[in-house]
Amino acid sequence: MKKLTMFICTVLCAVTLSSCGNNDRGDGTGHMYDVSVLGNPESLDPQYATDSASNTIIKNLYSGLMSTDSNGNIFCCNAESYTVSSDGLEYTFNLKQDNYWFFDENDDDIIDDDEYFPVTASDYVFAFRRILDPAMQSPYAESFSCIRNGSNIISGKALPETAGVIAVDDYTLNISLDYPSAEFLGLLATNAAVPCNREFFYSTKGRYGLDDRSVMSNGAFFVRQWFYDPYGVNNILYMKRNEVNRSETNEICPSFLNFTIESSEDDIRSMFKAGQIECFTTMNTGGLNLKKYIVNSSEATTLGLIFNPDDVYYSNENIRKTLALSVDRKEIIKDTDSSDIKEAYGIIPPAVKLLGRSYRELVADEQFEFYNIEEAKRCFEVGKAELQTESLDGAKILVCSGTIDSSYLHKLSQKWQELFGFYIGIEEVIPTEFSRCIAEKDYTIALYPLNADYDSGLSVIEQFEKNDFLKYSADGSEITDRIRKCADISELVDCYCVEESGILDSYGFIPLFYKNSYLIMQDDNEDILYDAFTGSLDFKYAKNYS
């Protein structure tokens, strides 16, 4: 029966290919996309990878139980349907029976029976156990700690096999939680929650996700070739449409994805302007005639000031509060025609969505505005008295180049000098140097881009648990624990609001602007989906009309 099902699937895919994969592509399908990724993907292991290059390849290589649309709505992907118990602790997923693993072991265009087989509930069980297994050191472990016995497994008190994830049969998956979690379905739409086949994983002998022979696909495309030489050129990752997962109800529009691996955004930008690639992502649109291209933007980053916790002056809360209370954001961006930034008073950026709407529509951040010059002056005097000093030494704001127009910060610096008599300059550095300075605490003040790992307010606030320089007086672990245990969306919204307020009250992160990230496409493309949180591009539905 299994062989017969596979044979029918192969025939259907072949028929679909002959009817839709034609060369003239009048409907926009069948195109080979030329794209670039910034840096060699660190790993194509979905339970481990975090960089944007890896996320893009993984997004096109795998698919999971759930997915999200451009409005943040969650819908079934490889799950046919699901039910949730009345207490919110038991999720039962009925899997689609037409999702297949494919591994092109022959490197040819002939699909053999032994190259593909069904994705089953056991593949999801193994994936979730890997996430929680402390030996795996998955960066997503805490996010999935709501799974029954998850915290005990992460801490080493229980074995991964005790996780509340059970394959009832090949196509029925049961997941039990320790507590109801309004965030759980959203987590199942992330890259980390895609399946992992146990037998294939162990067959790679520790190489899983590290080369083109150590990955297989259950998504829209598979990896045909991955070549990278850090000292060479012509580094590529080449993907081909996964015909075994293509059907009338599951269209995969492009035929091929050809990724070049580049070492700098400047190189990628030059290739795009020369028409050599179809699209690229950036936070900086300078030097581009945007009227020539299709531009999609997403306010996914909150730019805010952080302070070296070891600095004599700025470890003082009253000094940080002085700066926070004296920032007039509207004045800073007044008389500019840029739509690149918007004044920010909250922690969570507008791109985070709940119920298909921006979180910032549900919770207006103006309630967090605390501009008050007189109070700032009072705090300054109190801070100086606590530090037993008459003035502050000069300092610089560390800024990652290309993140924002520094002229905005010069206005802020001038204002502080007028009010308090100390000078704060601006120091721009390249991204790698910025990351080094933050990691080594080689800065006094920095303009920090606060991002999420996926479309979730929890993921934004988790950064205050993960990063020491964001903690200050806020107890990050308590904050995220409260959010994870919110049982419904209404409670979640209220909890986000409370926790934003609590973080802001420590003045360890002073939000200034919500910043756009951009997907810029040649004007003959459509339906390339951009996730500004992970930096990934999804080409499954992409069409080209050149």
Image: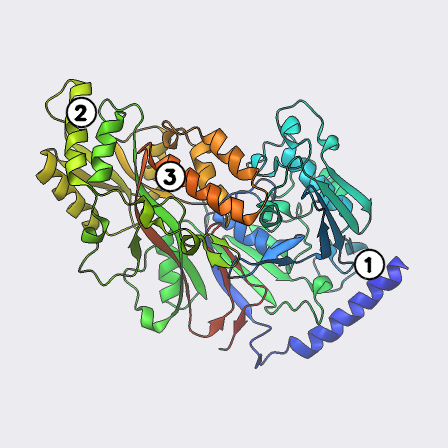
N-terminal label among 3 and 2: 2
Q: Is residue 63 visible?
A: no
The residue carrying pointer 3 sits among few (fewer than 14), some (14 to 19) or many (20 or more) residues within 10 Å by Cα, namely some
Q: CA distance from mark 1 to mark 2?
A: 76 Å
Residue 159, by quadrant, is top right
The residue carrying pointer 1 sits among few (fewer than 14), some (14 to 19) or many (20 or more) residues within 10 Å by Cα, namely few
Question: Image check: 439 left or right of 216?
Answer: left
Q: Position of residue 304 (x, y in %)?
A: 31, 42
- Foreground pick, 440 / 260: 440
- Check disc 3 and give the amino acid type: Ser
Residue holding disc 2:
382
Q: Position of residue 378 (x, y in %)?
A: 16, 31
Which mark is nearer the camera, 1 or 3? 3
Residue holding disc 3:
501
- Check disc 2 and give the amino acid type: Val
Location of residue 290 with respect to 376 vertically, above or below: below
Residue holding disc 1:
113
N-terminal label among 1 and 3: 1
Tell me the residue at 58%/67% (across/down). 541
The residue carrying pointer 2 sits among few (fewer than 14), some (14 to 19) or many (20 or more) residues within 10 Å by Cα, namely some
Residue 182, by quadrant, is top right
Q: Position of residue 184 (x, y in %)?
A: 61, 45
What's the colour scheme? rainbow
Q: CA distance from mark 3 to mark 2?
A: 23 Å
- Check disc 1 and give the amino acid type: Asp
Q: Position of residue 12 (x, y in %)?
A: 77, 71
Q: Secondary structure at mark 3?
A: helix
Q: CA distance from mark 1 to mark 3?
A: 57 Å
Tell me the residue at 64%/34% (across/down). 132
> How many numbered circles does the render carry?
3
Location of residue 253 with respect to 69 vertically, above or below: below
